Amino acid sequence: MAEQLPEHPDFLWRTPEPKKSYDVVIVGGGGHGLATAHYLAKNHGITNVAVVEKGWLAGGNMARNTTLIRSNYLWDESAAIYEHSLTLWEGLEEDLGYPILFSQRGVLNLAHTEQDVRDSVRRVEANKLNGIDAEWLGPDEVAKICPIVNVSADIRYPVHGATYQARAGIAKHDYVAWGFARRADEAGIDLIQDCEVTGFTTDGSPDDGTARVTGVRTTKGDIACGRVALCAAGHSSVLLDMLGVPAPLQSHPLQALVSELLEPVHPTIVMSNAVHVYVSQAHKGELVMGAGVDSYNGYGQRGAFHIIERQMAAAVELFPVFARAHLLRSWGGIVDVTPDASPIVGHTPYENVYLNCGWGTGGFKATPGIGWCLADTVANGRPHPYVAPFALDRFVTGALVDEHGAAAVAH
Amino acid sequence: MQLIHCPWCGPREEVEFHYGGQAGVAYPADPAVLSDEEWARYVFVRDNPKGRFEERWSHSAGCRRWFTAVRDTVTYRFER
């Protein structure tokens, strides 16, 4: 394990001062922003780019997620973007030339009720039609894949079966961010930390379709820009308020936790929407668990303890072996949730501003996929086909992509 | 656990309450004249401020009445 550890992250990229202007400014130095920077350089040769980040690189949700990667979503639109992303994950280590500890250990999505079973079987068939690996497993087969799951009939929410995607997996989130950052930096892209966006300079009017952003105001001075990509996750509403663009986003705390280091006991990923828990075991040995969102809006990067308590109760019932494990630490991120549990990507009322937000509780798995598609969108000035269905105007047309079944609680 | 002040019952534990989102969102006065954009705004878009937020809460495991409270979305502290 030790020989696989990469060098210290401080040396993987420069710490430049911002230039006066850039062709593209990416707001948000998390996974999505860094991946977008990488693919702008790699796929489109656009390198006069700055990524501005108010904190440190990848210190927001990229540092706080539970690293689950899968593509078994119900609708065609979601299947396309998430499967594109999963395919990129499968070659990402070679692309970045950096170890990301991507481990395709499979995901079980448990069904606890008759309705869960019907929905799950439907989703498996939909996945197969979209060329995504998926199977339906009965309780005995679930126990074969993950022997520590309690499949007895006498628990509060018995396991009636599960969907299984064998190609799903986990990756080391920090290494993913560092790998993208290093490649972007090598291409000449400026990664500017401690640089908070405080406003925008604009030209024209949204009313007659002539509105443009001419520059970004930051705590390190004004930066002129040709195009802007907003990748600010839970803080997207704060940026959109500066531009006067209404968007159907609500920011919520989302909590996760890890146990102490344990021997390998958990060979796969188990998710249960019904009891609000998802669990995997990290390479080092911690059990990594995520909860559902706290109900109220919140930007505090922490949540209420009763959410953790409820999640633990569910986890211990499903995995009796966890009862004597100790919780090491818990934390919270800020997730931007949309009404249909699908992201918002693409054009804004400002001609040269592109939006990428609303990934809610599941943005990590999309990191390479959205980086690829957003870079393409920014470079060509039109939505990439995989993100076109996720435009902001779907809330006006009514063409929602309702992924609550496959996404809402546990991504 | 955070205590929330119910105007009728006094301070009670957070788990007794349900969240109702932004307060003061009125039903359109003349729904028939709304454009698709205005409907989208009414149905889907709510304020999402970082800071002071006026919002609806229901004391669902107590008196079951709704009330409006002001809370800071960064500290989660209620004003009263």
Image (tube, rainbow, N blue to C red):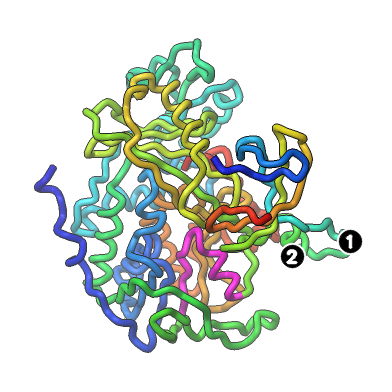
Measured as percent of width and height from the top left, residue A141 is found at 38, 18
How packed mark 2 is, by other alpha carbons closer than 10 Å (few <14, some 14-19, many 20 or more), is: few
Left-right relation of B54 to A242: right
The residue nearer to you, when weighing A193 against A32, is: A193
Compared to A286, does A249 lie above or below? Answer: below
In the picture, which quadrant includes the N terminus of chain A? top left
Question: Can residue A69 be seen by looking at this rendering?
Answer: no
Left-right relation of A406 to A61: right
The residue nearer to you, when weighing A82 against A338, is: A338
Measured as percent of width and height from the top left, residue A114 is found at 59, 21
Q: Main secondary structure of the magenta part?
A: helix
Compared to A262, does A232 lie above or below? Answer: below
- Residue at the disc numbered 1: B29
Compared to B43, does A352 lie above or below? Answer: below
Q: Secondary structure at mark 1?
A: loop
Compared to B80, does A12 lie above or below? Answer: below
Q: Secondary structure at mark 2?
A: helix
Quarter of the image holding residue A220?
Answer: bottom left
How packed mark 1 is, by other alpha carbons closer than 10 Å (few <14, some 14-19, many 20 or more), is: few
Q: Chain of mark 2?
A: B
Measured as percent of width and height from the top left, residue A164 is found at 41, 30
Identify residue type, mark 2. Glu
Q: Which mark is residue B37?
A: 2
Left-right relation of A33 to A90: right
Who's the residue at 70% across and 80% down the image? A207
Identify residue type, mark 1. Ala
Measured as percent of width and height from the top left, residue B37 is found at 74, 65
Who's the residue at 28% across and 38% down the image? A282
Q: Which residues are magenta?
A: A227-243
Q: Nearer the viewer, mark 1 or mark 2?
A: 1
Who's the residue at 57% across and 57% down the image? B73
